[in-house]
Image (spheres, helix red, strand yellow):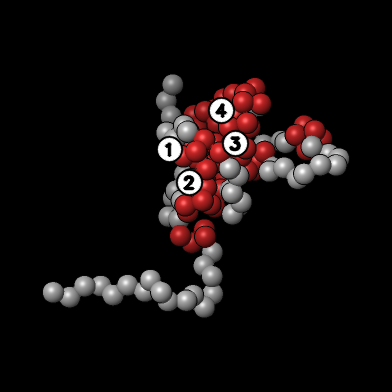
Amino acid sequence: MVFIASSKNQTWLFPPNIKDMIPEDHICFLVDSFVEELDFTEFENRYEGAGHPAYHPRIICKILIQSMLDRVRSSRAIARNVRENVVYIYLAEKLTPDFRTISDFRKNNTDLLKQIFKQSIAVARELGMVGL
């Protein structure tokens, strides 16, 4: 019997663009463009000044929306996806927030997340992706 040869240990001459590893019609591109259009100036003003740099809320929102679409609720599972799943790596822009960061963001920003969820439903309705 003949098997397809793998290239597990082959070194890549040029690193691939992670976007090329995701199907063109994947919903993550809609999530990405939707969140990019949101206004985060309130957050940017809140995080001005000294201190340790924070993850931009845009990145956390992208991975939270994608996790809602994938029905992943656990902060630990979301953090694992950000490390291992190509779609989440793309949305997180190759950053790796840990489960506490994700959990704390959800706890501390419930109003923002509710507002974003409502806006995402409205956009999905306009695009004919959901019927209410």
**Disc 1 to disc 4, how far (Cα)?**
14 Å
**Disc 2 to disc 3, how far (Cα)?**
14 Å
Which amino acid type corresponds to the residue marked 2 in the rendered image?
A: Asn
Per the image, the residue denoted by label 2 is 81
Query: Could you say which disc has been placed on residue 117 in the image?
Result: 4
Compared to residue 66, the image places residue 130 above or below, namely above
* Image side of residue 83 versus residue 40, left or right: left
Q: Residues within 10 Å of mark 2 (few under 14, many from 20)?
A: some
Per the image, the residue denoted by label 1 is 70
Compared to residue 111, the image places residue 48 above or below, namely below
Tell us which disc is closer to us: 1 or 4: 1
Secondary structure at badge 3 equals helix
Residues tagged 1 and 2 counted as in contact (Cβ below 8 A) = yes
Residue 14 occupies quadrant? bottom right
Q: Which of marks 3 and 4 is nearer the N terminus?
A: 3
| Relative image position of residue 106 (x, y in whole percent) | 60, 29
Q: Earlier in the sequence, mark 1 or mark 4?
A: 1
Which amino acid type corresponds to the residue marked 4 in the rendered image?
A: Phe
**Disc 2 to disc 4, how far (Cα)?**
21 Å
| Relative image position of residue 127 (x, y in whole percent) | 49, 35
Nearest the eye: 127 or 28: 28
Secondary structure at badge 1 equals loop
| Relative image position of residue 70 (x, y in whole percent) | 43, 38
Tell us which disc is closer to us: 1 or 2: 2
Q: Earlier in the sequence, mark 3 or mark 1?
A: 1
**Disc 3 to disc 4, how far (Cα)?**
21 Å
